[in-house]
């Protein structure tokens, strides 16, 4: 669902003879800033007391259609009642908020848009909710003096977006002009790019802030007219005659406004103007902050998959002939060559003993002493044993 943005233009407070309502007007935009034009919306309005999350005193629903400018207009107090009694609200407490929820499909699956404080209690509603005080004593007859005419000042001006303006006066009356849009004149030569007013804000203290298309603004002085001179306290004089309407001022030159803003996703924004020109900003992203502290070590990861088993020697067999057979874990074998060392050299023969003289044959004489043994030859070096070291090596 699209996110809905409300740009609040103004609120009008109207008190009728038979009902109490006040108007709420705002512009609806989607999350890209585009106006929701000529679109049917479902709106829920609630009156909260004490703050934006305060007690809900009253709720009502509306089905409205925005105009070609994306503006919606609600008579608060005149919708379909969901809960509460609008006419029972005590406006003299002056701590009320308006909460707006919306369904862009025109149904009742509302999404909260926001809440804003009612800065000014509708005068007629406030008067209707008050209690009349006791009759005071009659004052002494004073000297009749000239009665000063009460001045009637303009408290707010609203551009209705169709060429008409509604002017609200300090005596709670209002006046809507005829369509002041002049006939199209012949095209003049292109002038330099003008600076137009993009919005006007009533600061609530008699001053207005004008926001211009070049990003600057201007706050007027207090435009509240001076109060009329108080008459003598002998009674209220007749109302003064209405002043003559002033001559309408000339239409201001059209300014060039921003029609849409595009986030380019790289820190820059492209502004599209009503004269079809564009402007792309520099990268508005701030410098990266310093690295944060290193976080705690995370939990150990899961064990990885076991690797393929290697082929090792499972046993060694001495074949008794100088060779050895190695048996591997993959059931293969290997038999070495004869590892027996060469025979050592023969030792020298001992010297021959002297031959005895022949005697008569008789008893055999005693055998002569054996000759001295020759020096033994050096022994050859052979394998006496083999040790499997358990790491794929053998010690011979």
Image (cartoon, rainbow, N blue to C red):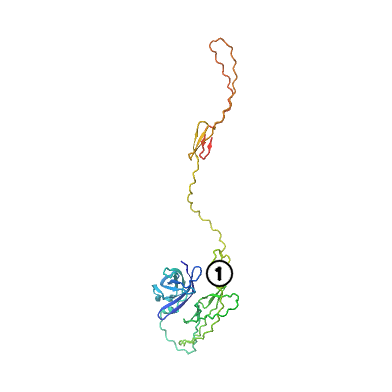
Camera-side residue of 263 and 232: 263
Numbered circles on residues, count? 1
Residue 82, x across and y down, in percent: 39, 72
Q: Would you place residue 291 above or below residue 68 in this image?
A: above
Q: Secondary structure at mark 1?
A: strand
Q: Would you place residue 65 above or below residue 388 in this image?
A: below
Residue 68, x across and y down, in percent: 49, 74
| Left or right of residue 130, residue 339 in this image | right
Q: Quadrant of the rendered structure where residue 59 is? A: bottom left
Find the residue positioned furthest to the bottom.
144
Residue denoted by label 1 = 271
Camera-side residue of 327 and 6: 327
Q: Is residue 50 visible?
A: no
Q: Callout 1 environment at 10 Å: few (<14), some (14 to 19), or many (20+)?
A: some
| Left or right of residue 1, residue 187 in this image | right
Camera-side residue of 67 and 13: 67
Please identify the quadrant where the C terminus is shown.
Answer: top right
Find the residue positioned furthest to the front.
186
Camera-side residue of 180 and 97: 180
Q: Is residue 260 visible?
A: yes
Residue 333, x across and y down, in percent: 50, 37
Residue 222, x across and y down, in percent: 53, 79
């Amino acid at each position: 669902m699209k996110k809905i943005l409300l740009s609040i233009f103004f609120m009008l407070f109207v008190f009728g003879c038979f009902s109490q309502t006040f108007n709420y007007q705002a512009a609806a935009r989607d999350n890209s800033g585009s106006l929701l034009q000529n679109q049917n919306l479902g709106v829920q309005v609630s009156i909260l007391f004490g703050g934006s999350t305060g007690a809900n005193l009253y709720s009502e629903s509306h089905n409205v259609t925005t105009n070609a400018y994306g503006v919606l207009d609600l008579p608060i107090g005149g919708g379909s009642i969901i809960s509460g009694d609008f006419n029972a609200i005590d406006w003299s407490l002056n701590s009320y908020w308006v909460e707006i929820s919306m369904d862009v499909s025109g149904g009742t699956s509302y999404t909260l848009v926001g809440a804003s404080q009612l800065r000014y209690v509708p005068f007629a509603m406030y008067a209707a909710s008050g209690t009349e005080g006791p009759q005071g004593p009659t004052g002494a007859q004073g000297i009749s003096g000239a009665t000063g005419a009460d001045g009637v000042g303009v408290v707010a001006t609203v551009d209705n977006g169709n060429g008409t303006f509604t002017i609200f006066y300090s005596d709670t009356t209002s006046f809507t002009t005829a369509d002041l849009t002049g006939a199209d004149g012949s095209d003049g030569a292109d002038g330099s790019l003008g600076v137009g007013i993009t919005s006007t804000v009533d600061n609530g203290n008699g001053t207005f802030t004008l926001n211009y298309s070049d990003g600057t603004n201007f706050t007027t002085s207090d435009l509240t007219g001076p109060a009329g001179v108080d008459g003598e306290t002998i009674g209220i004089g007749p109302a003064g005659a209405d002043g003559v309407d002033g001559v309408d001022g000339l239409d201001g030159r059209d300014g060039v406004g921003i029609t849409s803003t595009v986030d380019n996703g790289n820190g820059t924004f492209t502004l599209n103007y009503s004269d079809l020109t564009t402007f792309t900003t520099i990268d508005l992203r701030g410098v990266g902050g310093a690295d944060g502290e290193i976080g705690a070590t995370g939990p150990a990861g899961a064990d990885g998959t076991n690797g393929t088993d290697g082929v090792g020697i499972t046993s060694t067999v001495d074949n008794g002939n100088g060779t050895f057979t190695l048996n591997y874990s993959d059931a293969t074998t290997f038999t070495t060559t004869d590892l027996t060392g060469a025979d050592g050299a023969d030792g020298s023969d001992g010297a021959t003993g002297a031959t005895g003289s022949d005697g008569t044959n008789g008893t055999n004489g005693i055998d002569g002493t054996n000759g001295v043994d020759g020096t033994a030859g050096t022994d050859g070096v052979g394998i006496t044993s083999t040790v499997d070291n358990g790491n794929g090596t053998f010690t011979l």
